[in-house]
Amino acid sequence: MRTVANLHDRTDPAELRRVYGCFPSGVAAICALNEKGAPTGMAVSSFTPVSLDPPLVSVCMQNASATWPALRRARRLGVSVLAEAQDAVALSLASRTGDRFAGLNWAVTGEGAVLLDEASAWLECALDTEHMAGDHTVALLRVLSLAGDPARQPLVFHGSRFRGLTG
């Protein structure tokens, strides 16, 4: 048996962020039309398929998010799994200032879910449940319709930067 060396007792936020960054994750956009009919959305790197029956996915947002309160009121949410060349889209949707949708190409479903062009997958969802989890909210979304293009490589977030898949 071998013992793991160099573990830290620290769980301060900077160390947690650094260590969590060792785990690669896909990048998704959660978007919908707001009450005024304008697109609103955010980028998340905590999108996870959860269940096939019923069809559920999860996303996590900081409790301090100013965007999630508007999105959670939407009748339908669009989830766009961003493709490898969409790092600028992710940065735009993560911006704290300006028009997040400036220069982005998007479509809206009949129910108000906003889906981004050129993503690798799209899901139209409805909020199922929310769970408080420390400084984040975990939202379970029920998948109502979907499409995908497995040939389109996904955007990956790893080591605090966007990357593509190789190999």
Image: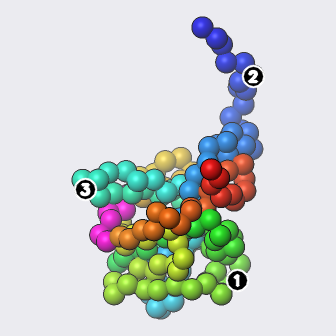
Residue at the spot x=65%, y=58% of the render? 164
Closer to the camera: disc 1 or disc 3?
3
**Would you say residue 64 is visible in this rendering?**
no
Q: Residue 6 — which label? A: 2
Q: Position of residue 66 (x, y in %)?
A: 58, 71
Residue assigned mark 1: 98
Q: Is residue 159 magenta?
A: no
Give, as a three-letter code, the residue at label 2. Answer: Asn
Q: Identify which amino acid the numbered label 1 is placed on.
A: Gly
In front here: 12 or 160? 160
Which residue, given by chain and number where applicable, does mark 3 sit on?
54
Left or right, residue 35 beside residue 87: left
Please tell me which residue is depicted at 72% across the width and 53% down the height of the picture: 160
Q: Nearer the viewer, mark 1 or mark 2?
A: 2
Q: Position of residue 32 (x, y in %)?
A: 46, 79
* Mark 1 vs 3: CB contact within 8 A: no
Q: Residue at x 72, y 48 (%)?
A: 159
Residue 101 visible? The answer is yes
Specify start and end residues of the magenta stretch as a single range.
140-145
Could you say which quadrant of the image residue 123 lies in?
A: bottom left
Residue that lies at the very extreme toward the bottom in this rendered image: 36
